[in-house]
Image (cartoon, rainbow, N blue to C red):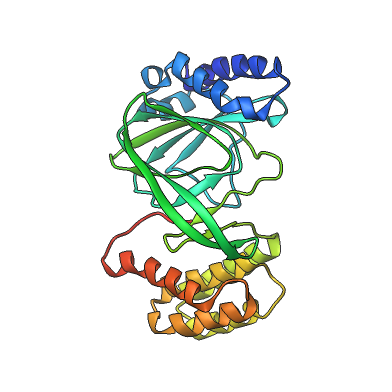
Amino acid sequence: MTVFSFARKIGDALYREWGEINFDVISFPSLAYNSITSSKPETEINVFDIPFSLLRVNQIPKQRVNNGSLFGQPPLTLYVAEDKRFFIEIYLWSSVDMTIHDHPFSGAFTVLEGVCQHDSYLFERSGGSNQLQMGSLIFKETELMSKGDCRMIFNGDRLIHRNLHLSKPTVTFIIRTYRDLGLTGRIYEESGLAIAPDLTIAEQKFLDYLDGVLRLNNYDTALRMIQSLISSGFSDFAKYHSAKVYLEQTRRYNEVESISDMLASSIPDVTSDFFRKTFLLQIEPILSGESYTTY
């Protein structure tokens, strides 16, 4: 049995079971959890056998790309349910992921190989805009997850967490919906800035060009681009993210003050001090020589 036929077997069964309760989203995390714990993928899948399985199949499910970014190194979509109600993926990890986030989807995940440090948080909002919320990020608890451990994924801020992949490799397996109605996943900075990272196509392309200019070390042009972006009608996230990328790539940390003031003048719901605090906390691991995966 290939990894794809294994995923198809449990995916088809889960689809039928979920359909019996009219695809109730609230029930999906427990159904996905039961599907994983009963099928025990940690005993059936060896991630290093997957490349050889690919040689034996004529067609694989359409691979999912999220706004041009890939989650996992690499990810692999194993199954896509009828009507795209949910999918099953496996991720090979070779780096630590420090991103604290919630989800616009529901499901469950398990560890197939390695060890993860699973940290969970609470968020108490105090202000900000819709895309950039100010508040307090409160550490809740931590646990170590190892082979066979499984956890449910609840949509929205009912689960704010991060997985630190402590082993090389770490392999995770997930069953999840695509995107639950009316929800936007958020990224949480340690400063308490909660970010909805949604971009229009035009905004994404602008940021792609900004990245290209920065890779050419044309920092003055990049700064003019950011100044024009911040004074434009583009979204709050696009403005914030352009400044974040600029500071990370140029390391012109002496400009944190002026860039924070510039952002606050365009996004008055978030104070200059809050932007400054966010950027300074982002700088700390860079200055200490740590290298993590970010969004």
Q: Residue 282's spot in the image, x, y percent?
A: 39, 66
- Write down the quadrant of residue 293 in the picture: bottom left
In the displayed structure image, the side of residue 13 where residue 144 appears, left or right: left
Vertical order, 73 against 79 (above or below): below
Q: Count the marks: how many?
A: 0
In the displayed structure image, the side of residue 83 where residue 225 appears, left or right: left
Vertical order, 163 against 107 (above or below): below
- Write down the quadrant of residue 65 in the picture: top right
Name the one closer to the observer, 85 or 47.
85
Residue extending farthest to the left is 288
Q: Residue 141's spot in the image, x, y percent?
A: 36, 42
Residue lying at 52% horizontally and 18% vertically, measured from the top left: 35
Residue lying at 32% horizontally and 37% vertically, measured from the top left: 143
Query: Can residue 117 be seen?
Result: no
Q: Residue 33's spot in the image, x, y percent?
A: 50, 23
Q: Residue 74's spot in the image, x, y percent?
A: 44, 41
Residue lying at 73% horizontally and 21% vertically, measured from the top left: 22
Name the one closer to the observer, 45 or 48.
45
Query: Can residue 5 be seen?
Result: yes
Name the one closer to the observer, 218 or 227.
227
Residue lying at 44% horizontally and 64% vertically, measured from the top left: 191
